[in-house]
Image: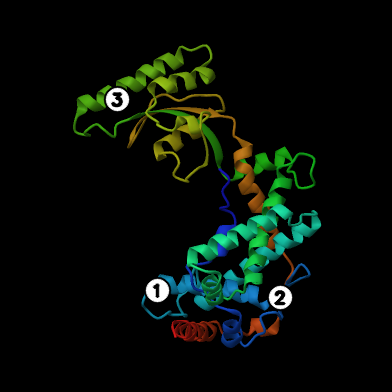
Amino acid sequence: MKGRAALCLALSASLLMTACGGEPSGESIFREAAGLSPDAAALTVDGREVPAWRYLYWLTYACDYIAASYGEEEIRWEDTVDGTDLEAYAREQALAGAALYATVENWAEDYGCVLTDEDSAAMDREWAARAAQYGSEEAYLEVLARMGLTRAEAEALSADAYLYQHLYDLFSTPESDLYPAERDLEAFAREQGYLTVDHIWISTAAADPADEEAVSACRARAEEAFSKLNGSPDPANDFAVLAETYSDETDRDQHPKGYTCRLGDGTLPAACEEAVQALEEGQFSGVVEAEDGFYLLLRRPTDLEAAAPDYFDALLQAAADSADISLTQACESLDVSRFYENLSAAREALAAEEEG
């Protein structure tokens, strides 16, 4: 369960090297679309200078996302997202992306994380794989150009993903400066609604809902399992034993101690969520009827290790959100709709040039 849900933009080498739906721009296109030198400083994040190409990359990412939502229609920039017009929204997303990556680099410096020879070798393999995917290195460079990236810039973004992983490795290492206090992780898990629950599921998927006899047979099977559990001297241990006999799960071996999830994330049916919240750790439920069958639930101690990746992301995101950010006047005054219009025209010209 090593998710990255707390990040506003996924820090993934594969995502960065394939980009955002296959269309941002190249260095010359950024210069043409924004009138800015790609290497000029666009902003600072806690003192770290961020070049314009990074800011414009994330601005393009946001604009492409907006454009995709309109399909063939022209973007109505006056439309709003949560009360914010689309130009302001795109700016916010661009700033968030640039700030997040700059924060990763700042943290890497603070905690002594650097790229290793293994990282460099892995990046070379990624490059070769992408070049092969597009038919040649030249073809892949053309793709990057439409994304606004040179090879060096694409690899700089990819490098941040490796720095991120090194930071997380430190976070997972006891005695390191990044290792979280257990009480803080517990508080995060509690506040975010994490819980660990095991279950025995008797499925009614194969039964016709109108077939009362078949549904009753499923219920009787669940009640039989409950009766055995209720009579057990060690229900926490015997729960897993009974699950092997009664549960209709086909992948129980992948989570023998149950699931760690967040309330409302859809892992458990609503009826099960309601029932498990009433349980103390170590307690089990009676038979719970849900849309897909009957459940017996055992609430286990919350698996803090499963919640740790999201806690790390939350800490990193909070640092990015609270960073001291200063945007240059050139970026502050950039007309987003005109930028994207110029960018789209430049892309069309680049595509025509490539076809010619």
Location of residue 335 (image quadrant): bottom right
Amino acid at pointer 1: Tyr
Sequence-wise first label, 2 or 3 = 2
| Label disc, if present, on residue 3 of the rendered structure | none
Report the Cα–Cα distance between label 1 and label 2: 30 Å
Does the CB distance between marks 3 and 1 fall below 8 Å?
Answer: no
Q: Is residue 102 left or right of residue 285?
A: right
Location of residue 214 (image quadrant): top left
Mark 1 closeness class: few <14, some 14–19, many ≥20 residues within 10 Å: few
Report the Cα–Cα distance between label 3 and label 1: 48 Å
Q: Residue at x 53, y 20 (%)?
A: 236
Badge 1 is on which residue? 70
Does the CB distance between marks 1 and 2 fall below 8 Å?
Answer: no
Dot 1: what SS?
A: helix
Position above or below: 282 against 254: above
Mark 3 closeness class: few <14, some 14–19, many ≥20 residues within 10 Å: some
Badge 2 is on which residue? 43
Mark 2 closeness class: few <14, some 14–19, many ≥20 residues within 10 Å: many
Badge 3 is on which residue? 218
Give residue 118's position: percent from left, percent from top: 70, 52
Position above or below: 74 against 177: below
Report the Cα–Cα distance between label 2 and label 3: 62 Å
Sequence-wise first label, 1 or 2 = 2
Q: Residue at x 41, y 70 (%)?
A: 69
Amino acid at pointer 3: Cys
